[in-house]
Amino acid sequence: MYWVNFIHIYQPPIQKKTILERVVKESYRKITEGLITHPNAKLTLNINAGLTEMLIKNGFDEIIRNLQVLLERKQIEITATAKFHPFLPKLPENEVVRQIKLNEETHKKFFGSNYQPRGFFPPEMAYSPNLGRIIKELGYEWIILDETAIDQPVDYTKIYQNDFGLKFFFRERSLSFQILSAQIFTAKSLVKDLSKRTVGGQFLLTAMDGETFGHHRPGLEHLLWDICKEPEVKTITVSEIENYFTDKILANPKNSSWAFTRHELIKNSPFVRWDDKENPIHQKQWKLVNLAISAVEMDQRAETRELLDESLYSDQFWWASARPWWSLEMIEHGAHKLLKTIESCILMDNKIKRKAKRLYFEIITTGFEWQRTGKVDELARKEDEEIQERLNGEKNALSPAEKKEMVNTLKKQLQISIKNQEFLRAEEIKNRIKELTDSAFNPSFIPKVNQ
């Protein structure tokens, strides 16, 4: 059995150092050090170059050094992506290309000749056919997408490619969701699930946020290397799939993302969490984005160009969706960065700057109104109902033995947290143990991740 695990690690440009430090300690350090001590473990990693620079700037150089070691060993491959995690299907082509090239330049600087990306990860796994054309023209061989990007069930014995030769690898939603929601927590439970799904010699491709391992789910990071102790499973990278599977099939994926529920699939609205036509906050945000792009094109100074690059990150739209994720702080941060970008353009007409400021205030006041009137709660409740339905629909219930193993792992993590005086972390782990030992246990959804 072949397990192809793809993980994506990212923090927004405005992330607080205290949060970054916690994620590094609970997730990034554990993942990279664990892989180094388990040389048979392999995975494909996406790290946006914006995060790479952030780690260096804040003194977490050891994460980058660990990645350099893993690249040298060929335990991991690092994909290409867009530097500041923008929502690519909504951007003009020149901005898309710039973000990708910035990412490439930064990673060649830090990883040298070991950084030779063959594949591409679009932020939010957001894809459009036009983006596929751009990726192929830039020289990348493959792109990773959600399985909902094609209308038929994915055949995991085949390599998909389109008319102009771009290959597509599709993540398996159900198993990815079961791992990130900790319904699958141990190597034994993963092997059991893999054996069900790989009849006929298939590979299994999962994809999720890397922060799931250790940060959102304490103890889950052990799954990444414990699986190597199972003789039935071989871990490989995405690019290595073609070493074992050679049959090809034609595919032309449609617009898609990895945050795509059944309801949105029926409505054919894969981008609704970033560009909801019925969400006035989203529409004002994108107007502000377009004003900023126009302003910088006119200004053409390096400092304003750099401000714009950082201002295009996708989180500001995600947290304005209320599906169910909502953060007025994140909304304001994004709008403010765009406003400051426009105001810094010395050639921009004052009338346009006033329009930008008006949009900024409309975004914030609409957000406050949504909170005050209960609209956020209403939208979030509808979304939570669908998420709960999805959880209830999963068939992979934990056995008593699996639950016991999961609790034992968490108890070890609890003792480590107490010893290190990480009391907030210890409280989170205690709550997780309580969930698992409750007879009415139902795996909870991670409120931060995108899948």
Image (cartoon, rainbow, N blue to C red):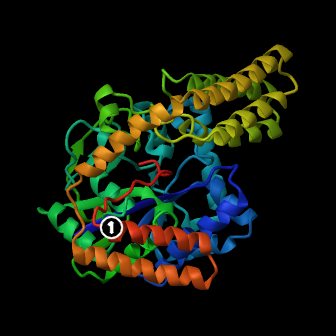
Q: Is residue 420 above or below residue 215?
A: below
Mark 1 closeness class: few <14, some 14–19, many ≥20 residues within 10 Å? few
In the displayed orientation, state which residue is furthest to the top: 351
Q: Position of residue 121 (x, y in %)?
A: 47, 49
Residue at the outermost left position: 200
Residue 38 picture quarter = bottom left
Q: Secondary structure at mark 1?
A: loop
Quarter of the rendering containing residue 163: top left
The residue pinned by badge 1 equals: 438
Q: Is residue 248 left or right of residue 437?
A: left
Residue 105 is at least partly visible in this image: yes
Residue 45 x %, y %: 48, 62
Left or right, 273 with reference to 97: left
Please indicate whether residue 252 sits to the left or right of residue 118 in the image. Answer: left
Looking at the image, which is closer to me, 63 or 285?
285
Residue at the spot 34% in from the left edge and 47% down from the top edge: 167
Question: In this view, which residue lies farthest toward the front?
Answer: 439
Residue 218 appears left or right of 343? left
Q: For residue 200, what is the image quadrant? A: bottom left
The residue lying at 81 percent from left, 21 percent from top is: 353
Residue 139: image location, x then y, percent: 48, 46
In percent of the image, x 27 and y 69: which residue is there?
A: 190
Give the percent coordinates (x, y) of residue 156: 22, 54
Number of numbered markers? 1
Rendered position, 433 above or below 230: above
Instruction: Name the residue located 21 percent from the left edge and 77 percent from the top edge.
Output: 232
Seen from this angle, which residue lies furthest right? 346
Question: Is the N terminus in the top left, top right, bottom left or bottom right quadrant?
Answer: bottom left
Let me know if residue 67 appears in the view: no
Residue nearest the observer in this picture, 57 or 263? 263
Q: Amino acid at mark 1?
A: Asp
- As rendered, which of 24 and 401 lies closer to the eye? 401
